Image: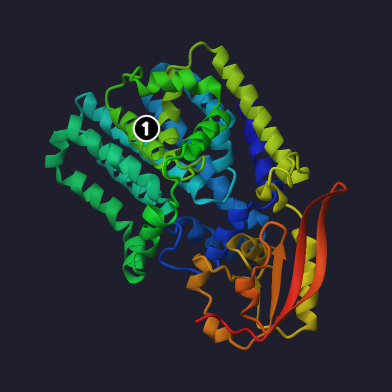
Amino acid sequence: MAAITLFVFKFAQLAFAGVFQDEAYYWMWGQHPSLSYFDHPPLNAWLLGLSSAVFGWNVLALRVPVALSFLADILALYLIARRLAGEGWREHFWVTLLLFLATPMFWLVSGLALPDHLLLAMCLMAIAFLVRFFVDRAEGQRGADRDLYLGALFLGLAGLSKYNAAFLALGVGVYVLASHRSVLREPRLWLAAGLTVVLQAPVIIWNATEGFASWEFILHGRHAGLRYSYDGFLGLAFGIVILISPFLFWPIAKFASGRVAIAGTGFVRITFWISSIAILVVSFSTLVLFHWNLVAYAAMLPFLAFVLRPRWLLAGQVLWGAAFAGLAFVNYAIMPLTDVQGWRDEATGWSYGWAPTAAAVRATRADHAVGFIAAPDYTTASLLGFALQDRDVVSLSPNRDEFDYWFDPKAHAGEDAILFDDAWRPMNSAITAQFKTVTPIATLPVMVFGRQIDTHRIYLATDYTPNG
């Protein structure tokens, strides 16, 4: 009953939660089709573009791909349980499903149109078929070609979702070298590996034609460096406590130490360690976001039910996860629960207030012949663009972002513009200096239940002279 309740509640979250800041950003990617993109590989943007073409420009279209990948997560857990748990597969599946629904990490990434929802689904599907293949081989069978090729297909799609799918590929590769070297003599392994690599062709081609911009950003540009600082590690540790929960620490320790001794599944534990160690090392050089180690969490999830003892840990996890899901839903769909201003919780603040602002911008555009609409940051530009249903709203941030790949400043020289900013991302002199005049038009307090959580501002700017 708890699993079914959380399952239904998940669809309420998908339908009613406000648009998260980066969801709008990736939606804007989808309105500008490309082989790949600056921050991430293209699969999420491709699906959002397809969804918008089918369902229109609305929250339904934004979340349809997320709902489908959520169902794919459940299918993968079902397939793994059927293969590994024998006669007790039903109990194993329902316990695993409950852990999936009641772990805040999985709840978050399976509810937002970020690349991570696809990374999770594709990794779980890859694990499901590769488990079938390697367990068969461990039992003395040949292993089905279908399972090998489907595992490679979903691994390739995981790589098209997010770059850290490479951790799973490394885990599989190390496992083959350590335990299944005989398969190296079989052409089908190389064909499967080739399929995974070929699926990365759009990313490879895009990077080759764009000076390897995305790979440079991922490997170097986004790591500002916290030299001789523990801030990144402390943030990672805090995220694990809240978003995994203390109730799973003991089962995870048993999984990681090899207490799940099922022949043919060693690649999942190797993947867990490779990803976790890599993210731990990175945490000492930059701030680490909670979901960066998602591949490790995906690898462990289908196996925790084997070591989830004592059983009261499951009850504790369900209460923890249900409380988190309920609070998150209220915070992003009904009213802010955090001290938005005091905590600088811009993610919550940006979930509210866009309809009145979009109406005010449309009214301003009706009164003034402007060439474009812009904001000082990719987040606010994307959120305003989504609210306006306008693919051409642009970020004028001096920092590189995806808008730089479809907005040509020189083509708009001499035009007037509507500028937008807010309390979190105010206009700066580097932007206003590119216009002859910048005149305030409207100030719109964002009020929720009588409480001001943000301030939106609209300006009319004239005679755009882009830098350079």
Would residue 154 be found to the left or right of residue 397 on screen? left
Q: Amino acid at mark 1?
A: Phe
Q: Which residue of the protein is positioned furthest toward the front in this rendering?
A: 228
Q: Secondary structure at mark 1?
A: helix
Return the residue nearer the eye: 46 or 456.
456
Residue 5 appears anywhere in the view: no
> Relative to 436, does residue 354 appear above or below in the rendering?
above
Q: Which residue of the protein is positioned furthest toward the right in this rendering?
A: 450
Residue 111 placement (x, y as % from top left): 59, 43
Residue 65 placement (x, y as % from top left): 55, 51
Residue under pointer 1:
272
Q: Residue at x 40, y 54 (%)?
A: 218
The colouring scheme, among rainbow, by chain, secondary structure or one colour, is rainbow
Q: How many marks?
A: 1
> Relative to 350, does residue 184 appear above or below in the rendering?
above
Residue 408 placement (x, y as % from top left): 52, 79
Q: Residue at x 54, y 85 (%)?
A: 411
Q: Residue at x 48, y 21 (%)?
A: 249
- Label 1: few (<14), some (14–19) or many (≥20) C-alpha neighbours in 10 Å: many
Placement of the N terminus among the 4 image quadrants: top right
Would residue 341 be found to the left or right of residue 81 on screen? right
Residue 371 placement (x, y as % from top left): 65, 83
Return the residue nearer the eye: 417 or 254.
417
Residue 6 appears anywhere in the view: yes
Return the residue nearer the eye: 152 or 433.
433
